[in-house]
Image (cartoon, coloured by chain):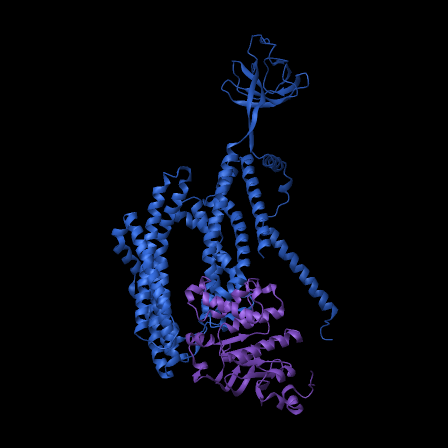
Amino acid sequence: MNNKKPSLLRSLGIALGVVLVIVVFAYGVKVTDVNFETTRSVDRLTSLKRVIRALARPDIIEYDYDITVVEIPFYLPCPEGEEISAPDLDQSQPYMLASAYCASPQEIVHITGKNFPPDTKGPVDFYTTSGVKKPLGNFSSDSNGEFQLDVELPTRQPIAEAQQIIATIRNKVGNPMLTDTAKVTWDKILETVFMALLATTIGTALAIPVSFIAARNLMAENNSPLTSIAFSIVGWPIGIYLGLKTEGFARQLLTPYLESPGKAAIGLMICIVLIIVILQWVLKADDKKPGFDIMDIIKILANVAAGLAGIAVMLFVETLSRSIGLALVEPLGPFGFIGNFLYQMGEAATLIIPVFVALGLGAVVGGTLGKIGQNISDKSPSDVVRMVNIIGTTVAGASLFALIGTGINWLYQIDNLSKTLYWPAGIGAVIGLVLALIVKPKQPLPTGMIIYFITRTILNGTRSVEALVMAIVFVIWVGIGPFAGSLALALHTVAALAKLYSEQVESILPGPLEAVQATGANRLQTIVYAIVPQIVSPYISFTMYRWDINVRMSTIIGFVGGGGIGFLLQQNINLLAYRAASVQMVAIAVVVATMDYVSSVVRERMV
Amino acid sequence: MLEIKNLTKVYEGGTQALTDVSFSVKPGEFLAVIGLSGSGKSTLLRCINRLIEPTEGQIIWNGEDITAASQDEMLRIRRKIGMIFQHFNLVSRSKVITNVLAGRLGYINPAMSLLNHFPKSDRDMAMKQLDRVSIADQAYKRADELSGGQQQRVGIARAMVQEPDIILADEPVASLDPVLAHSIMQYLETINQEDGAMVLCSLHFLDLVHRYADRAIALNDGKLMFDGPPHDIDDEKFKEIYGKEAERVG
């Protein structure tokens, strides 16, 4: 029995553990400034009561009031040598009698009210000549419409003129109405929900492709030899550069046709027809046969033409969407927001198309060069591959490090070419060269896992920055308002959802994947036919869950200017308008609870 | 003609799954692969369509070295090799017909297939093969609504629409009861005889081997122990393949 320690040592260990735990918590109490004494302070308890009572009465409904004022002229203090008598009273109206009509500050005066509406409550105040109000107390009339009240007079500067004691009778008139606070809250809560919807949509759209890259089981089998990696590292930046240039060139070339919607529409038709014709021809000629001939070159050219036509289509759609949207805003009247939507989509396209074309061409050039590298590595003898590797990795290392150097220069504005370009390029070249010499020429390297780890790291980094903090940056970029909040939430959503999604991809059954691969399906087909059916419903359920979270987050993103209800809430808290703040809290609670319920119902249906 | 030459597979971590296995299969032959669990049967079958990369050795099919094929060439080779699995490996949330059509993915245009569009001829072929295994009426049900035997028939139909020259069947009846096992084996036999596809089928029960196979090979601990007609497996050979304590059943 070697797991039985001497019992003394054991109990000492436990005692030490207990002491350690106590010390940790004691220190915790110190650093978090725990102070239970304050919780009993009378002042604080009074404030707390006031705030809680205000919060319990959200300022949602109000009435119009019919206000009757009952007044007694009053001298504070008594004027010297003058007798003050009771004023004349109209006894058909509510009236008040006082035990005295003049007195010194802080004296007690007895007030009797008569003819008041029965069972009514209301304030009794002291009004100075300048209209300053000092509350004296509250009256409460009995069933005969009478009341008795002792009030202590306030301490005021002596004034010779008559001041007033006033009782205010307020009668509710008409139906209950929503307060302005309630109306503003409704507007803002709507804004909040749609902010969350937009952020979730954008986030989901971006998270889906990323989730495949961040799934270990899909990436683990991607191994490429050094030649292929080096070639594609060189290819990607070239492709991206070419993409940006092509897009700019196409935009310039098409400018005359982009100016009028009519021309753009015709151009769009022509391009679409062109693409269909080309694709049909290319597809018909499609057959996987070995070798390379003149037909392949024609096919590549046809694909390039189709790609260019595709860019043109995007540009035409952008222009059309913008101009049609703008034209629709006026005629649609209350539905003008649909026109605005089209216009904004056009604007978004202006932003997205260059990125899209650049990444697309990057992928094409990088992928093609990578494939060429793969073929060289597969088909050539080892010595040749080593030679190609030495050249390829040197160039790849140099260009990669030069790019990183340029990036660093942009951040820190060093503006010293030898430090930001030549040195990094040289170091990169040396590293590449060394790598080419060390690695066996045809050794497959785990490219998939490298990309997987990089993606995961970026996702984890992004996820650990709160959306609230991101919103601060976006507020600077696009200004205060819900758009900044949506973008911040969208970015956070991408990171969070991509992780959840990728874990779902990792947990799929490998059997169907294997079966579809065995039929000769390519990578994309395998994803669509073996993986997508397995992940659709968890993806939907995660997206619903995320919308739920986004609604909750967008309620506070207004604290930093990100739009939504948070702005209002913060404002009211700062103004100590707790009854108004209470309305917003209720609204948040209702919306979040509803979302929670709806999303759980939908998720149950889906899974 | 399929030739396996000195095939060796060592998994990462050092497990020796196959050691220097060589044999050849004639077109139209029904070859049974027998051996204990873990003897390397599944590895052997998966090396043939390179779902598992062999460590050493060659697999030559009609003069072409499968082990040397590039990834693109491999897709072209795989579409002529149908595969049937012990656990059927259907996509359970997809329809039966979609599962079968997946067998055509290697043939049709990739772009169109991503939009779930298959030519009519392919759809007809899928229905025809489902009809052959007598479950055409289940075509539009979800795959997981079917029973085990029906699911395996979908698996066969999926392999058949590939118009395969080789069928790799990895313990196709191990998850089924004996009656269903025979019915599934009969479908494989029909395909072997009518369509002339070469069948490599790993099996556990010797009576099935005797009943259906033209020839058998046996693996023990990754080594080839036997290559010959099934009726040559006598008691001595049997003990060599399955170990000294084994007893014959069935």
Quarter of the figure that contains the N terminus of chain A = bottom right
Relative placement, left or right, of A315 versus A177 is: left
- Residue B194 horizontal/vertical position (percent): 53, 79
Asked which quadrant contains residue A67, the reply is top right
Q: Residue A299: in sight, yes or no?
A: yes
Side of A450 relative to A240 (left or right): right
Q: Is residue A330 above or below residue A464?
A: above
User: Compared to A444, does A167 lie above or below?
Assistant: above
Spot occupied by residue A581 in the image (x, y as percentages of width and height): 54, 38
Query: Does A501 appear above or below B59?
Result: above
Q: Residue at x 50, y 65 (%)?
A: A529
Q: Quick one: A351 or B24, which is closer to the camera?
A: B24
Q: Position of residue B10 (x, y in %)?
A: 53, 82
Q: Nearer the viewer, residue A174 or B116?
A: B116
Question: Relative to A554, is B88 above or below?
Answer: below
Q: How many marks?
A: 0
For the residue pair B166 and A357, the one nearer the viewer reads as B166
Q: Is residue B212 left or right of residue A280?
A: right
Asked whether the viewer can see residue B13, the reply is no
Q: Quadrant of residue A585?
A: top right
Residue A397 coordinates in the image, percent (x, y): 36, 71
Comparing A280 with A443, the one in front is A280
| Quadrant including the C terminus of chain A | bottom right
Looking at the image, residue A117 sits to the left or right of residue A393; the answer is right
Q: Could you say which chain is coloured blue in the image?
A: A
Chain drawn in purple: B
